[in-house]
Amino acid sequence: MKLIDGKQISAAIKEEIAGEVQKMKDQGEKVPHLAAILVGEDPASETYVNNKAKACKKVGFDSSTYRFPTDVTEEELLEAVDFINNDHEIDGLIVQLPLPDHIDNQKVIQHIAPEKDVDGFHPVNVGRMTIGLPSYVSATPHGIMELLMRSRIDTRGKNCVVLGRSNIVGKPMSLLMARNEEPGNATVTVCHSKTQNLAEITSKADILIVAIGRPEFVTADMVKEGAVVIDVGIHRVPSDKTKSGFRLIGDVRFDEVSEKASHITPVPGGVGPMTIVSLLMNTLKAAKREIYG
Ligand code: NAP
């Protein structure tokens, strides 16, 4: 079994990005700039936004955070998005989700200029990805494609089963694996909560991508000998073996599935570290006007 080391791969990509930024600086160009809108004081959202700002700093990007109180109106938020859309210094904009209940998440996302939508959530980017046009691909699926490519996993003509059909992971993942490009060109089956004979389907997969949100749901009997297994799940569970009193596990029973898989992503250290790196890659593309010219 070979471990697909997301930590190592993401560190290598960060170095590559930092090199690109240095070149931009040497040529007297502006460095990429990522802006984030953060509403309220949810600690998890604070942590995500802070981590993104730290990652930007590490590779030499500029970053800025626009903070709003929980009672901000939808109109005020849309005005802020407009302002950032029109600011030529800013290349990419992310709106930290979820927003408070009185604000329509979709309305705000659809207000972001598609060419600055580095989270890849705007319907224009989702649509462009679907029909194979250049687009920003959302961070987790983008990160998984990068892991497959850099681990030299052959996806062409393979049987790929995607477990989960969420808009942020399962659905884009299945489209990317089926696209006429590599990585891609796989024969894809999408499974969800209404799927019958799930284990029968998953055990035929050469590549199994699991984004189901159920701790250690996938067991060895559901996996084909020699399969490539990508575990997207992250769950924090109590543990008496760690100082913090908890540990992270995925949607896959790593101990037994790793005995059968040819390649597998660990949790933590697999898909997770690729998420922020994907955002940085999209922001670099935005700064270089690679998607929309
Ligand atoms: P989600 O929106 O809850 O979607 C879960 C999908 O799994 C749904 O399509 C659901 O089917 C399907 N499902 C649930 N129970 C099932 C069952 N018993 N049998 C078959 N299918 C079942 O989750 P998500 O946002 O895609 O996230 C999935 C996991 O990945 C979570 O653990 C999340 O924390 C993690 N995640 C990690 C990262 C990262 O950076 N590593 C990023 C995003 C998400 P229905 O559509 O029929 O309901």
Image (cartoon, grey):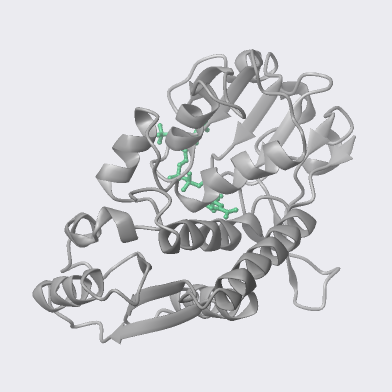
Q: Is residue 243 left or right of residue 62?
A: right
Relative image position of residue 30 (x, y in whole percent): 46, 76
- Residue 41 seen in render: no
The quarter of the image holding the N terminus is top right
x, y percentage for residue 106? Answer: 22, 54
Give the quadrant of residue 26: bottom right
145 relative to 100, above or below: above
Where is residue 198 shown, x and y percent of the image? Answer: 58, 19
Q: Quadrant of residue 55?
A: bottom right
For the residue pair 266 and 217, the one nearer the viewer reads as 266
All told, the count of numbered labels is: 0
Tell me: 174 left or right of 183. left
What residue lies at 40% left-to-right and 29% top-to-bottom? 132
Horizontal side, residue 49 vs residue 55: left or right? left
Query: Where in the figure is residue 200, as x and y percent of width and height?
Result: 64, 13
Query: Residue 63 occupies which quadrant of the picture?
Result: bottom left
Q: Residue at x 61, y 15 (%)?
A: 201
- Residue drawn at point x = 46 percent, y = 62 percent: 283
